[in-house]
Amino acid sequence: MTKVVFNRAIPMIDRDSFLTPFDKMFDQIVSAQFPEITKTVGVNPMQGTAYPKVNVYEYDDKVGVVAEIPGLDKADLQIDVEDGVLTIAGDKHGLFDDQGAKVIRRELKHSSFKRQFELGELLDGESIKASFKDGLLSIEIPKIEPAKPKKHSVKIS
């Protein structure tokens, strides 16, 4: 059995408020060390906020993004692409009823969220596929074959 002790002398620290600056600092360090990552992978994995947490995979023909979003239905999610930016958004308001309760500890997110990824020139933002099952959102972004330089002969007069 877990014993919960409530001590008003200890300030409550919001986990996300505490960790988000560290996440951003890590993203800046990785981006500085690997400035070509967006061109290489086709998506900027460092852009956006820290929720939902994602894994980004590169395959020969596509880039995959897997986001962990527990507690939502696919109707609560929205995926948009505008001006080369992929946006994952959702709303976790009203998932659980704590009206009238004194909150002793809050670790579960109870808000809306938005995470954005800049798509590079090598990804097809028009042909994205997505699926959602058991709290995992899987997105497949097909790669575009880069245009090969055209060569033609010029007749000398």
Image (cartoon, grey):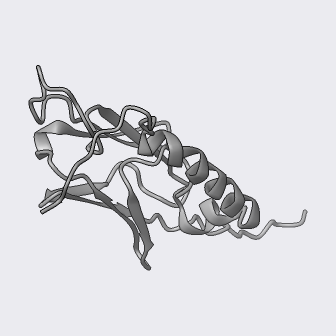
- Looking at the rendered image, the quarter that the N terminus falls into is bottom left
Q: Position of residue 145 (x, y in %)?
A: 50, 68
Could you say where residue 133 lies in the image, as x and y percent from the top left?
12, 60
- Residue lying furthest bottom in this view? 60
Task: Classify 30 as above or below 107.
Answer: below
Question: Measuring 42% from the left and 39% from the top, which residue is drawn there?
Answer: 14
Left or right, residue 96 beside residue 110: left
Residue at position x 38%, y 56% in the image: 53
User: Across the whole image, how many numbered discs are drawn on residues?
Assistant: 0
Assign the C terminus to one quadrant of the image: bottom right
Question: Considering depth in this image, is 137 or 39 the residue closer to the camera?
Answer: 137
Q: Where is 118 relative to 80, above or below?
A: below
| Nearest the eye: 7 or 99 | 7
Task: Find the residue positioned furthest to the top.
Answer: 100
| Rendered location of residue 80, percent (x, y) | 33, 39
Residue 48, compared with residue 70, is above or below; it is above
Q: Toward which corner of the image does residue 99 lie, by quadrant?
A: top left
Please, which residue is most extreme toward the right here?
Answer: 157
Q: Residue at x 25, y 34 (%)?
A: 110
Q: Nearer the viewer, residue 4 or 71?
A: 4
Give the left or right position of residue 121, taking residue 131 as reference: right
Viewer-proximal residue among 86 and 88: 88
Q: Residue at x 19, y 53 (%)?
A: 70
Q: Is residue 141 above or below residue 9?
A: below
**Quarter assignment of residue 44:** bottom right
User: x, y (%) of residue 33?
Assistant: 75, 66
Quadrant hosting residue 10? top left
